[in-house]
Image: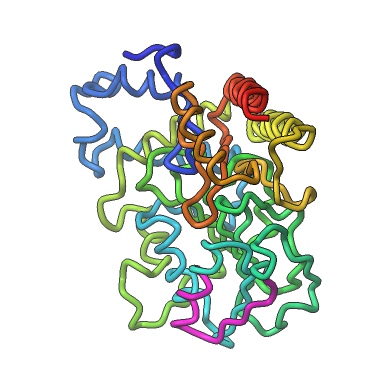
Amino acid sequence: MSNQQERVYNFSAGPSMLPLDVMQDIASQLTNYEGSGQSVMEMSHRSPEFEKIIREAEEDLREIMNIPDNYKVLFLQGGGTLQFAMVPLNLLRNSKKADYVVTGAWAQKAAAEAKKFGDIRIAGSSEEQNFTFIPKLKKEDFRTDADYVHITLNNTIYGTRFPELPETGDVPLVADMSSNILSEETDVNRFGLIYAGAQKNVGPAGVTIVIIREDLIGHAAKEVPTYLDYKIHADNGSMYNTPPCFGVYVAGQVFKKIKNTGGVAAMEKLNREKAEKLYRYIDESSLYSCPVAVEDRSLMNVVFVTGDKDLDKKFTSQSKEAGLVNLGGHRSIGGMRASIYNAMPMEGVDALIDFMKKFEAENK
């Protein structure tokens, strides 16, 4: 077993760090889960042991997110990307219209996919300014007869987040929360549907969480493939087919840790402290800068540049040697990006700032 000293600080945008104590506990039971004589990776998804795992995972997620009883919780596959199609296939049920707010590459992809299935309008976009801010939208900016409004709450590539939710009236709000679920408190009642790939704050890649209001289930057209109908999964307790069993198990262990360490409120407090400390250093630095509008800065993905592409490359190379890995910005924009999800400890942020100070002193 590697100890903490042998591990790097992983600033990857995803898959990303998981809590070390959770992984160690999972490792201790990897070949013999709770005396069952088998690994969760090899047990039947119809077994009493796994039925307990998935039931407790849902119960714990409901508790820590305060999910109302009139919402279904689904554990699916296909990542957030499959949800780009599942959402319109299930929710374009009346007018066949939907409004999308485009705040980054993933929001763009979601809108492009939805355009295959209905009348999709871009209600707001920050593309002209390289997605460095979140458009300020009013209820009047959305069509009253739209079947839903879609937003991407946190933008991993560009380092922005919605500081507050747009008001959509009676139109259901749909949110991609892949990179910020469980990082801050969320009023689930504000949404018709939430979806999130697990590989940022929850667990390994392979599990996708969908939280959907019951009245939005059951409207898929008959020609929609069976697996892409939310009702099929809701009616079968996320086990219409074999679910990503091990991923659900890891997610459930993370939910338990959050529940036992102060809940999402405690995670939000720590995440704000981490982000504020890092942004404060960047803003006070004479070498680094953050291009994102201050009020829209992400708590999860901190982007910054030196203003010199060669120096940026030198930074990412030397930081890796220092045990700070995956700090390169997305290939589409370059620069640097520190993803500081729930599992990134304050010590990791401190280590990054110490390295940034040393690098700045050596490269003035």
Q: Residue at x 26, y 24 (%)?
A: 30
Residue 201 spot, x, y in % from top left? 51, 39
Q: Is residue 177 left or right of residue 234?
A: right
Answer whether residue 183 is magenta in the image. no
Q: Residue at x 24, y 38 (%)?
A: 47
Quick check: 244 above or below 39? below
Q: Is residue 332 left or right of residue 132?
A: left
Q: Nearer the viewer, residue 282 or 225?
A: 282
Residue 109 spot, x, y in % from top left? 49, 68
Is residue 261 visible to the viewer in this orientation of the structure? no
Q: Residue at x 45, y 64 (%)?
A: 83
Q: Which residues are magenta?
A: 110-125
Q: Is residue 151 left or right of residue 106?
A: right
Quadrant that contains the C terminus: top right
Is residue 301 visible to the viewer in this orientation of the structure? yes
Residue 92 spot, x, y in % from top left? 52, 80
Residue 355 spot, x, y in % from top left? 59, 23
Q: Nearer the viewer, residue 273 or 302?
A: 302
Quick check: 279 above or below 229? above
